[in-house]
Amino acid sequence: MQSSGKQNYKVLVLDLDGTLTNSKKEISQTTLEALKKAQQNGVIVVLASGRPTYGIVPLAEQIDLASFGGFILSFNGGKIINWKTKEVIHERDIDKETIPMLYEMAKEHGVDIISYIDKDIIAENSDNKYILKEASINKMPIRKVSSFVNEIKNPVPKCLIVGDGEVLVPLQEKMNERFGEVMNIFRSEPFFLELMPQNIDKAASLERLLKHLKLTKEQMIACGDGFNDLSMIKYAGLGVAMSNAQDAVKEAADYITLSNDEDGVAHVIEKFIL
């Protein structure tokens, strides 16, 4: 990483929740206008999130990502899509043979497991309050199915187990013992247990994207607030933490901007890009 001297930044990578969006999960008008200006000036915007692809689409449409040729990096880096051409630049999935074993472990512990196919959340129990929360965050419909395992006919980038924290803590330990060598298993919320392919993170995927774009990490700014943003903040030419970020993220950053409720992203764009 380097200091924040005037650089010719070409790529702006933004985490969504707690970074691009405010506490109401909305992009403010000030931030929206700054993003449009940055893109008009030729900066490539990348929306990088743990959300499924179609959970990112409403925000991508709001900032006109397709028109300007920006990218969606979903599932924490499991998938990268050129949102203008819809070309998939990179994809890593959970092995299909593993799905029934993940399902069985969830059922043994009395919790629900979901995944994502196209624009739908796939679930056997559409009334679970945590599944409804995931649907609400991502603005995605729940497709209720009679058999989760039978519905997943192709590999998927991610599964999510939902339930009360006191159940997920011991389950996370057991799953790590059994699948830890091939999968990345972590809690993004007390009630969300994420199941991802091993060695997936935002930095590794951004490295692939930069290679595709024939650009260097010195030409990239990455902004985030959470632990899953640490890798990209350390990797980027300019790693930016929001002032509402976790302490570890602030310590790793080159620059700390204003909070997500004070247009911190707009401040970065004004200071380093425009």
Image (tube, grey):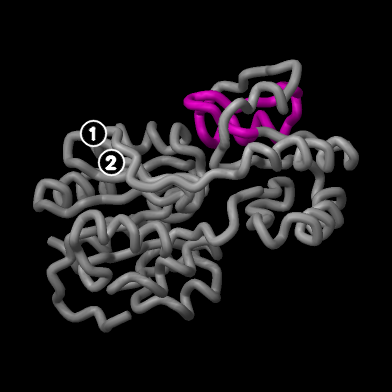
> Which residue occupies the foreground of this view, 40 or 82?
82
Q: In this rendering, would 192 be left or right of 68?
A: right
Q: Quadrant of residue 109?
A: top right
The amino acid marked with disc number 1 is Thr
Label 1 packing within 10 angstroms: few (<14), some (14-19), many (20+): few
Real-space CA distance between mark 1 and mark 2, rounded to the nearest whole angstrom:
6 Å
**If the image is split into quadrants, where does the C terminus sit?**
bottom left
> Which residue occupies the foreground of this view, 66 or 20?
66
Q: Are marks 1 and 2 in contact (CB under 8 Å)?
A: yes
- Residue furthest to the left: 41
Q: Secondary structure at mark 2?
A: strand
Residue 58 x, y percent position in the rendering: 38, 32
Question: Residue beneath label 2, please?
Answer: 82
Q: Which residues are magenta?
A: 115-140
The amino acid marked with disc number 2 is Asn
- Compared to residue 256, the image places residue 166 above or below, namely above
